[in-house]
Image: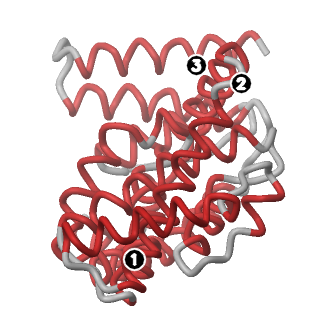
Amino acid sequence: GTQITSLDKKVEDLTADFKAGRITAEEFKRSVNSVNTEVAKQGGLITNGIKDLRSYALGFVGVIEAAQGIARITGELFDLSGEIEKTDARNKAIAGDSLPAFEAAAEATANAIGLTRREYVSLAADQALRLKQLGLEGDLVTELSTQTVEFSEKLSDFSAGELTTEQAASLLNDALTGQTKGLKALGINVKASKDEIAAQAQELMRSKGLTEEQATAVATLQLAFDATTESMKAFGDETLSIDEAQDQATAQLNEAKEALASSFTPAVVAAT
């Protein structure tokens, strides 16, 4: 209603003031807690005595979602906090030296393609695991893993909503082992490029010292990227711009939820 809209605008203004340095963190915390109290009176989320990050995230999520009557979010966040700890530990173990590059790429593009930064790193780590199982390492793993995430989002858009970005990433992961049936179902026929795959594989063996298995896997994945690019050309810029706007809005909301959920992890709670 009008009151929720007013509170929404108030949080936007407070956020802008805080980011611009016009108010201190303590002033921001007090103000957002005040807004949360108003939200609570209208059936939203109740928050008391939470630190700056939790105040910001819960204020943002609370105001946006109170209008939709989603009061169950606090319980969900406790569950999510446990998942976050496990995901972060897994990503660190798999990514290894590639983790800083994955995090930098996520910072730059994750929200724009509809992912949280953590989701982006997780998808990159999934592909990195496949590549490392083939014996690949170093910059090639980092580059192909981040490209996989970027092209997964394009495939998801190209599927007109039939595939999530995560599902599209799984198809590209499978391409490493020659499983391209899922891509073919989208009109991306990598098998038809068998001779080209062989030629590229030979070049990779010569220039990068890869084994035949490694080179064939990399060549297949790169041709899947190329085929996706060609298919996307006819998809339409207008449709893509609408999808990107929706993706970014969803990602930013999920990012706020993750930020709040992180504050419920045992390590953070113990420090507060």
Question: Mark 1, residues whose alpha carbon is within 10 Å: few (<14), some, or many (≥20)?
Answer: some
Considering the image in quadrants, where does the C terminus appear?
bottom left
Rounded to the nearest whole Å, what is the CA distance between mark 1 and mark 2?
A: 41 Å
Indicate the amino acid at tag 2: Ala
Q: Quadrant of residue 169?
A: bottom right
Disc 3 crowd, CA 10 A, few/some/many (<14, 14-19, 20+): many
Query: Which residue does the numbered mark 3 point to in the structure image?
Result: 8
In the image: residue 40, left or right of residue 34: right
Q: What type is the residue that disc 3 sits on?
A: Asp
Identify the residue shown where x is 48% and y is 78%. Answer: 82
Residue in front for this viewpoint, 267 or 206: 206
Q: Residues within 10 Å of mark 2 (few under 14, many from 20)?
A: few
Which percent across, then down, holds residue 178? 61, 77
> For residue 234, which numbered disc appears in the image?
2
Among numbered discs 3 and 2, the one appearing first in the sequence: 3
For marks 1 and 2, the one nearer the N-term is 1
Residue behind mark 1: 85
Residue 64, position as x, y percentages in the image:
63, 31
Q: Residue at x 58, y 18 (%)?
A: 7
**132 and 37: which is toward the camera:** 132
Q: Amino acid at mark 1?
A: Glu
Above/below status of 114 relative to 272: above
Q: CA distance from mark 3 to mark 2?
A: 39 Å
Quarter of the figure that contains the N terminus: top right
Q: Which of pointers 3 and 1 indicates the residue nearer the eye?
A: 1
